[in-house]
Image (tube, rainbow, N blue to C red):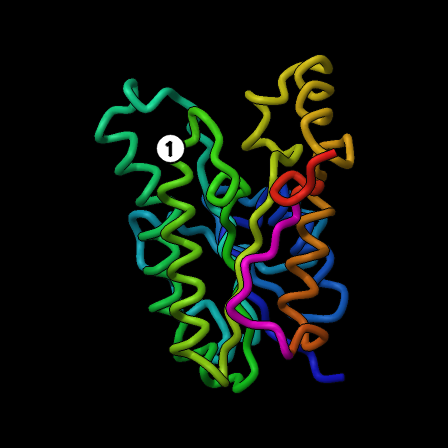
Amino acid sequence: MESRNYLIVGGSKGIGASLAEYLSFDNDVYYIARSEGNTAIEATYISCDVSHEALPLDQLPDTLHGLAFMPGTIRLKPFRSLKPEEITEDFQRNVLDAASVLKQCYRALKKAGNASVVLFSTVAVQQGMPFHASVAMAKGAIEGLGRSLAAEWAPDIRVNVIAPSITDTPLAAPILSSDERKEKSALRHPLKKIGQPEDIARTAEFLLSEKSSWISGQILGVDGGLSTLRV
């Protein structure tokens, strides 16, 4: 099977690092981050802060079969306490940076003829949760972007969105800072556990692969049943 080219934006830790590890077995993987992360992963590291820099396209292949945009924020505050600059920062990191990366990579994705894009939302968009206003606004925009581009870029580029619940990653460390907090969070889910990076990465790997070639425009909940089940 011909090797495929994948770009992971934010692939130095957490879900992105797991995804890079899985994809690198059979493919050429490039990951963009501000720091290198796990040097044991056989993937090409490219230093770039996508919020402030254009992508170094000269360091990427001219054909991309898949792209995953991983960066995000988890800012949990009462709405009345949110500052305008905090809302703007969340929207920039989650939405505008993603849109910028996709615009810059469109030609490389289009050239593949059967490319796949994976974006990330949150269970809090569909399942209303207190103190999630800023991140839910931003990730709601990501879901709209994903569905719109899935329609606009069909049939050459598929676009899907994964909407996880809380996952044990460095980004979520302040929320899961003790065994007690982890247990409390786990019990909120019908499956009585919190997500692991591998749970989300395996789903992203599937959506990026040709095994999901008839799936596009979907918001896929990987959330321990939280969004749909009552037990």
Give residue 215's position: percent from left, percent from top.
61, 73
Q: Residue at x 41, y 51 (%)?
A: 48
Q: Quadrant of the C terminus?
A: top right
- Does 185 appear above or below 212? above
Residue at x 29%, y 34% (from the top left corner): 87
Q: Residue at x 65, y 56 (%)?
A: 20
Residue of label 1: 133
Residue 123: name its quadrant. Answer: top right
- Give the residue drawn at x 63%, y 17%: 177
Q: Amino acid at mark 1?
A: Ala
Extreme residue toward the left, this view: 84
Dot 1: element: helix
Give the image location of residue 161, x and y in percent: 53, 58
Tell me where residue 37 appears, x and y as whole percent. 60, 42
Q: Position of residue 81 (x, y in %)?
A: 29, 18
User: Going by the image, does 74 lie left or right of 66?
Assistant: left
- Tell me the magenta residue range: 214-222
Question: Is 26 placed above or below 110 here?
Answer: above
Q: 187 left or right of 49? A: right
Quarter of the picture containing the N terminus is bottom right
Is residue 189 shown left or right of residue 141?
Answer: right
Quarter of the image for residue 211 reads bottom right
Instruction: List the single residue furthest toward the front.
Output: 230
Q: Tally the marks.
A: 1
In magenta stretch: residue 140: no
Q: From what the image shows, is residue 128 above or below residue 101?
A: above
Question: Image quadrant of residue 197?
Answer: top right
Label 1 crowding class (10 Å Cα cut-off): few <14, some 14-19, many 20+? many
Foreground: 81 or 17?
A: 81
Per the image, is 216 magenta?
yes
